[in-house]
Amino acid sequence: MTTRSSGFSLIELLVVVAILGIISAIGLTAYNGYIAGTKKTSAKNVMQQISLAQTEYYSNSGNYFTQECTDPSADTSGEIETELFGGGDQISEDVGYEMCIVSSGASDTSYTIKATRGESSLELTQNGAWTE
């Protein structure tokens, strides 16, 4: 006498769960890479806005806005927003990068914009050269 089962075996269910786990891990990794790329692009856009604001600042004061900093922080980012953007929220927490502007010449005649997020860092010089 043979019996017929009309359901799935435990092994079949475990195989399906394992396959779904692998697919979700691959998807999560790809999604995290996508998010990191968009944050980097947003940071680059903000850095270019800072560069444009520096031109206006130079027109008004005769020198570029620079800061005494080694590592960008929330304080230096806030100071940039206050001095160059009149308190606007250009460097938002959504960007994920902290920024500062350091002098790269004598008496604030040139500058470099630095941005960091964890281990990732970006630099934009006054003449538009990028360093990652």
Image (cartoon, helix red, strand yellow):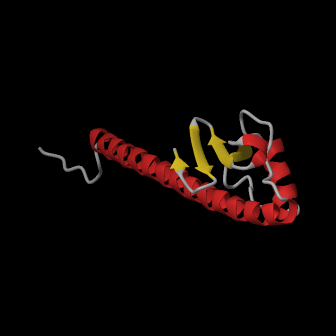
Q: Residue at x 81, y 66 (%)?
A: 59
Tell me: 2 left or right of 39.
Answer: left
Percent of width and height locating residue 78: 83, 50
The mark tally for this picture is 0
Check the image and name the residue furthest to the left: 1
Residue 13: x and y in percent read 33, 44
The answer to whether one can see residue 84 in this image is yes
Question: Which residue sits at x=75%, y=63%?
Answer: 53
Q: Nearer the viewer, residue 100 or 107?
A: 107
Viewer-nearest residue: 14 or 70: 70
Locate the N terminus and report the quarter of the image it occupies: top left
Query: Looking at the image, which is closer to me, 69 or 89?
Result: 69
> Horizontally, is 17 left or right of 40 in the view?
left
Answer left or right for 93 relative to 30. right
Snapshot quadrant of residue 103: top right
Give the farthest residue toward the top: 70
Q: Determine which quarter of the picture holds residue 74.
A: top right
Q: In the rendering, at what x and y percent does residue 76 appear? A: 80, 44
Q: From the viewer's perspective, tell me whether residue 5 is left or right of residue 83.
A: left
Q: Is residue 88 visible?
A: no
* Residue lying at 74% horizontally and 56% vertically, measured from the top left: 91
Is the residue 118 above or below the residue 40 in the image? above
Q: Where is residue 102 drawn, in percent x and y? A: 72, 42
Point 54% across, 54% down: residue: 35
